Image (cartoon, grey):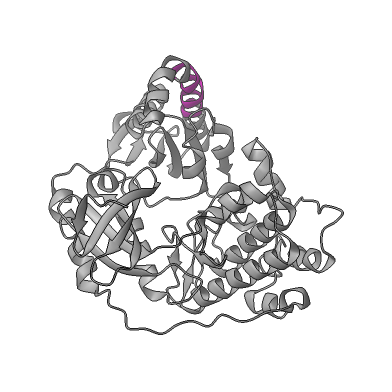
Amino acid sequence: MGYSNMIGKYQLGRTIGEGNFAKVKLAKNIKNGQYVAIKIIDKNLILKNNLINQVQREIRTMKLLHHPNIVRIFEVIGTKTKIYIVMEYVTGGPLSDKLSYWTKFNETEARRQFQQLIDAIDHCHCKGVYHRDLKPQNLLLDSKGNVKVSDFGLSALRKQPGSLLSTACGSPSYVAPELLTQKAYEGAAADVWSCGVILFEILAGYLPFEDSNLSKLYRKIYRAEYTFPVWFPEGAKKLISRILDPNPRTRITVAEIIEDPWFQIDYEPTCSIEHEDKLIAEDVHAAFSLYKETEKEGNVLHASGFINAFQLIAMSHDLDLSRLFEEQDSEKQKTTLGSKHTISETIEKIEAAAKDVSLSIERMNNSTMKMHSPKMTRCRSCLEASARVIEVAPNHCVVEVSKSAGELLLYKKFCKSLSNLLTRESRVETNETKPNIQQTQTK
């Protein structure tokens, strides 16, 4: 294995993973010969895509967790253009790769891996950490087939006992039904649901909830519509039925899963490990210190911290999200619309819709604006409303429109105009810009 360059005491080698904003390279600690995985993040890319908080959250979360079944973070190194997160190297690759080779696992192996997953999640929850994106791609296997939970980029830290979460996140097939309702939810229960989906998948060889139509998929998840294969182990059936309970209040807890008879077979609890944490907080702050100067330049488009399942789905440019997002809350007079445009193009559509119904528009920041009837024409037919654009991917946004005062009929007229603009024009532009979209995907 040849090494081309050095980062601190680490000699970088081949690339073992690659995403939109980061590469993962195999590296060697020249002081002790230990192999590590180094996640290399481009500062400019995460700055432009407003992902600074997500990266910081991942580092902060992994610092808290010390467990044999969770990938360990050793240190963070920052340069002018890159952030290097030095992590434990797990040789076996993701569980999803093994699933693609084997299709499914035998009952004994599936139970052992599920036991390790539950032990890891139990440790996370005890530390006040909710993963929120559990799936086989984020479960790594070591040389002995032991599970290592990774990728805490969408995780959340509990602020206080009993506190609820509000940001919907995760991957479509593994997301809990309560996250689809846009209401506050309990992080532990959402993680448990994802664990149940994973157990079903590794035993059956396929997902319990599958559909090419996103709306139909979410409907199946919300109603917990799935079917066990006829040969499915009876004990696992009973356990999964309690896990995939669409009501989070009656869903089985981690503590109850551990007491389950099927789970208890050959169960050897994995204990957390205590060691000196050499990752000093100052080092983490130093790695991000250059952001402060860059942010002052005003090059960042602060959309919002909306990171969820839709962000992952929206990367497919052939998917029309409009009907999935479109909904109206008649009591709160709040409407949510989907836009298959960039954030700047979406803002132009809002301005055009406001003009259609004779509303004046005032920009509050790069993603929020207020609409109101001109002062000279204010009478019974007037309106005060606001619109917030949330970027979920480069060519996909969500628009939240809220009415604060004025006539409901005029508000509905504006929303209808905006919906028509977004829907009609997105179809035309999709055909015209298809070559550019393909070029973007290649990049």
Q: In this view of the protein, which residue sits in the foreground, 370 or 191?
A: 191
Q: On the picture, is 99 further left or further right than 48?
A: right
Residue 123 in the figure: left or right of residue 215: left
Task: Answer left or right for 298 relative to 205.
Answer: left
Count of numbered marks: 0
Is residue 374 found inside the magenta-colored segment of the image? no
Residue appearing at x 29%, y 62% in the figure: 28
Write down the region rendered in magenta: 417-429
The structure residue drawn at horizontal position 50% and vertical position 54%, both measured from the top left corner, is 169
Residue 350 appears anywhere in the view: yes
Q: In x, y percent, where is residue 153?
A: 41, 58
Q: Is residue 278 left or right of residue 132?
A: left
Nearer to the camera, 428 or 174: 174
- Give above or below for 31 relative to 226: below
Q: Residue at x 69, y 43 (%)?
A: 210
Outermost residue toward the right in this view: 230
Q: In this view, does 137 lie above or below 162?
A: above
Which residue is farthest front? 1
Nearer to us in this view, 348 or 343: 343
Residue 23 seen anywhere in this rendered image of the structure:
no
Q: Locate the C terminus and report the quarter of the image it occupies.
A: top left
Q: Nearer the viewer, residue 67 or 29?
A: 29
Based on the displayed image, in which of its 4 quarters is residue 110 positioned? bottom right
Magenta stretch: dominant secondary structure:
helix
At 23% from the left edge and 71% from the top edge, which residue is drawn? 31
| Res 254 → quadrant | bottom right
Residue 405 placement (x, y as % from top left): 43, 44
Where does residue 303 sit, x and y in percent of width and height?
33, 45
- Whether the magenta-drawn stretch holds residue 420 is answered as yes
Looking at the picture, how far across and down is residue 156, in whole percent?
44, 65
